[in-house]
Amino acid sequence: MSATAAAPSGATPGTPARRPGVVLAVILITQLMVILDGTVVNIAMPKIQHALDFSPSSLSWVQNAYALAFGGLLLLGARAGDLLGRRRVFVTGISVFTLASLLGGLAPSAELLLAARVLQGIGGAIAAPAALTLLMLTYREGPERLKALGYYSLVSSGGGSVGLVLGGMLTDWASWRWGLFINVPIGIGLVIAARRVLTETAPETGRFDVAGALTSTLGITSLVFGFIRVADVGWTSAEVLGAFAVGVVLLVTFVLVERRVSHPIVPLRLFRSANRSASYVTMLLVVGTMFGMFFFLTQYLQGVLELSPLAAGLAFLPLTLLLFTASRVVPRLIARIDSGKLMLTGSTLVALGTVWLTQLDANSTYLADVVGPMLLFGLGAGMIFIPLVSRAISGVAPEDSGAASGMLNVVQQVGGALGLGILVTIFGTASRNSTSTVPREVLTDGVHAAFIGSLVYAVLSLTMIVVSVRPWNWFRRGPEPLEATPEPVVVDSHV
């Protein structure tokens, strides 16, 4: 799950473009590619672990390395487009992403694969914001732009779950490496098309907040590293304590930097709104729940139910279809139903789906015990994301609209990485303490503990929604009118 957008700062909407249909295709394919890469390797995790000798805890870095680099540098990538020209930045980002995909597919070791995933995340962070801004500039405000944004939202919200299905196909029919190789011809085609059909934008004046980008990204990475290492070396290890200490120091430094620089990457005034801050925290928790479900259910389907990668990928189709459906239906429901009620209902469904997953054991079956939770997850998540994003950017000053929506990008990526890091720790501890000697049962014990951790995340997100929407007020007065937003909301869900 990963971006939102309002009108780009400093842009001139409605700039004529050559062959706008081709421009839209370039942008949609780009968005699908960067979203897919957050999950396309998920189904291939068991194969990657065996091929490159990952430990069970370090395996999560195949996903986290991409998510942290992508989410942490996304705001800096958006600023690069403003200052250097968006077509130039877009082509650079796609080129980096394509090269990194080739290197990842060829990687002979775990270390080189992780380095390639970081480079992919950097390329995605450079290309994705420029792509969305170019879309906004290509289509004039009105029905045509709304239609283009609708396609963009559909690709973004469903791309992550489509990646699970595609990853299963590629892993089963060819190799896990093709989950990365497939980006190479697509990326080359995008670069050629971009040079022919995209119009360059005039550079703006300003400065890069490099210090803010680096301290925030490295600080979060250090915390995630600490949580993941706990599974192997324990809470009292000097390595773990050092990672937590460095993470806290860097994040405190980030706040101090943002208070002093003239062009902060995250204006701290965004957090003066209690509703907006609650929306960011809720998004972090919801995405953490979803990433945990994807990661550990994949392990369960292949390691316990013994499904092939292809079958495991296809097993996620119920969730994928519901997410696609919700992305089309929920915007219409918001006009008729209070958004708080949708969020509360959706969060309740996600929590119930997580409770159901905690009941999985070595004797469970797909149809009886997995399909039901997936349906609840898909329906619930689809009801949460669009209203949650609307609340997060509602009432934002025009000059802060890009930063507010970009911050949601970061929260989603970091929420997934941090949540997965914590759940991997729970999984590793439970696996080590399992009383069984049968690998299939040991895996079941670890996955069961991870789903209990996911349930804590789901309950916390439900609590945040209850506190922020205050359902007890519904019995005293009618629903609050929705605040108008300057531009349609576009939701990029990494899940």
Image (cartoon, helix red, strand yellow):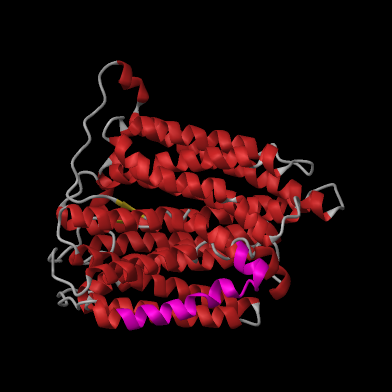
Task: Please give the name of the residue rendered at 52% of the width and 75% of the height, measured from the top-left corner.
Answer: 182
Residue under the image location 22 percent in, 79 percent down: 84
202 lies left or right of 308: left
Q: Position of residue 198 (x, y in %)?
A: 24, 76
Residue 36 in the image: state x and y as whole percent: 48, 63
User: Quick one: 227 or 305, which is closer to the camera?
Assistant: 305
Pinpoint residue 406: horizontal percent, then vertical percent.
31, 58
* Residue furthest top as drawn: 476
Residue sitting nearer the eye, 297 or 119: 297
Q: Which residues make up the magenta segment? A: 168-193
Q: Is residue 45 visible?
A: yes
Q: Quadrant of residue 472?
A: top left
Q: Quadrant of the N terminus?
A: bottom left
**Left or right of 222 on screen, residue 150:** left
Q: Is residue 84 above or below residue 421?
A: below
Judge whether residue 357 is colored magenta.
no
Residue displayed at 65% across by 60% down = 310
Location of residue 276 with respect to 44 vertically, above or below = above
Left or right, residue 149 beside residue 17: right
Residue 407 seen from this side: no
Residue drawn 78% across the image and 49% down it: 433
Main secondary structure found in the magenta portion: helix
Quarter of the figure with residue 328: top left
Q: Is residue 178 magenta?
A: yes
Residue 473 falls left or right of residue 263: right
The percent position of residue 262, horizontal first and vertical second, equals: 19, 67
